[in-house]
Amino acid sequence: MNFDYSIGGMTDLCQRLEAVRRRIQAACQQHQRDDNEVQLLAVSKTQSIEAVNAVWRCGQTRFGENYAQELLEKSTALAQAEWHFIGALQSNKSRLVAEHASWVHGIDRIKIAERLSAQRPDHLPALQCLIQVNIDLESNKNGVTLDELPALIDAIRELPTLRLRGLMAIPLATDNECEQRRSFAAMRQAFDEHRSDEHWDTLSMGMSQDLEAAIAEGSTLVRIGTAIFGPRQYA
Ligand SMILES: *Cc1c(COP(=O)(O)O)cnc(C)c1O
């Protein structure tokens, strides 16, 4: 007998996606939030296009990628999905991102925002942008400090073809829920302080290990990779 493990694997993906949705619902319920306040971004970096297609067929519509080349390949293969670029933005890759993403989460300097604005094709809607904040001031992470945030917000708002939607953070990795919540709460406070127009509506925080803490503190979008796709498939 030959078993087709790919089919079993794909069913598994749907079950894991459902399990993540249930975690989101449970966290919303626990913190008196409506579940439609929290969007799920499936982070498909390093995963095959077959796996992405399977998750799409289970009803997931938003996907996140960290590498411009993978964004290009997968967004071309599955153009109906909404593609978010969540990786570190290098200047020489900004054109690919401007041409293939609907959202960019990691803006942390005006130069890159200007490039994205100039490179966004005219026939596409505005590129939806989030500023990355280095909330725990880690030397190995991108992002602005809270002090640098106001100037960057003002500068991005001047740019045509970009629409600033809010903030994103990747806090210090820890499994201590108090520490997780402390970073997320600081983000939430910054998010509330800088709210100024009706487009400021997205606070991107929470991953597989800490989505509950993020939702407790007001996340509106969680970015989930491993809990949906399993371990990453590094070549
Ligand atoms: C990889 C990645 C994720 C997903 O992380 P998991 O722990 O696998 O859920 C979320 N956000 C960013 C920015 C990432 O690079």
Image (cartoon, grey):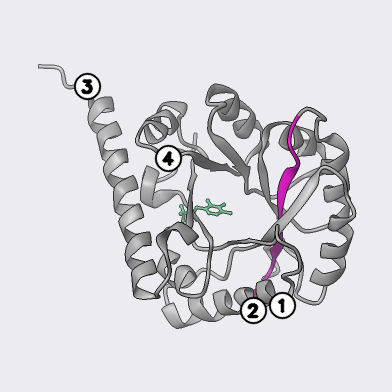
Local packing at callout 1 (Cα closer than 10 Å; few below 14, some 14-19, many 20+) is few
Label 2 – label 3 distance at C-alpha = 50 Å
- Whether residue 115 is situated above or below residue 136 in the rendered picture: above
* Residue occupying the far left of the picture: 1
Tag shown at residue 30? none
Comes first in the chain, label 3 or label 1: 3
Whether ligand 1 has any atom under 8 Å from the Cβ at mark 3 is answered as no
Residue lying at 17% horizontally and 22% vertically, measured from the top left: 3
Q: Position of residue 104 (x, y in %)?
A: 68, 47
Comes first in the chain, label 3 or label 4: 3
Label 3 – label 1 distance at C-alpha = 53 Å
Query: Mark 2 — residue?
Result: 189
Q: Nearer the viewer, residue 111 or 159?
A: 159
> On the rendered structure, is 87 left or right of 182?
right
Label 2 – label 1 distance at C-alpha = 6 Å
| Quadrant of residue 171 within the rendered picture | bottom right
Q: Secondary structure at mark 4?
A: loop
Q: Position of residue 126 (x, y in %)?
A: 76, 41
Label 3 – label 4 distance at C-alpha = 24 Å
> On the rendered structure, is 42 left or right of 19?
right
- Taking the magenta stretch, the answer to whether it contains residue 129 is yes
Label 1 – label 4 distance at C-alpha = 32 Å
Q: Can you tell which of label 2 and label 3 is closer to the viewer?
A: 2
* Residue occupying the far top of the picture: 1
Query: Mark 1 — residue?
Result: 193
Q: Amino acid at mark 3?
A: Asp
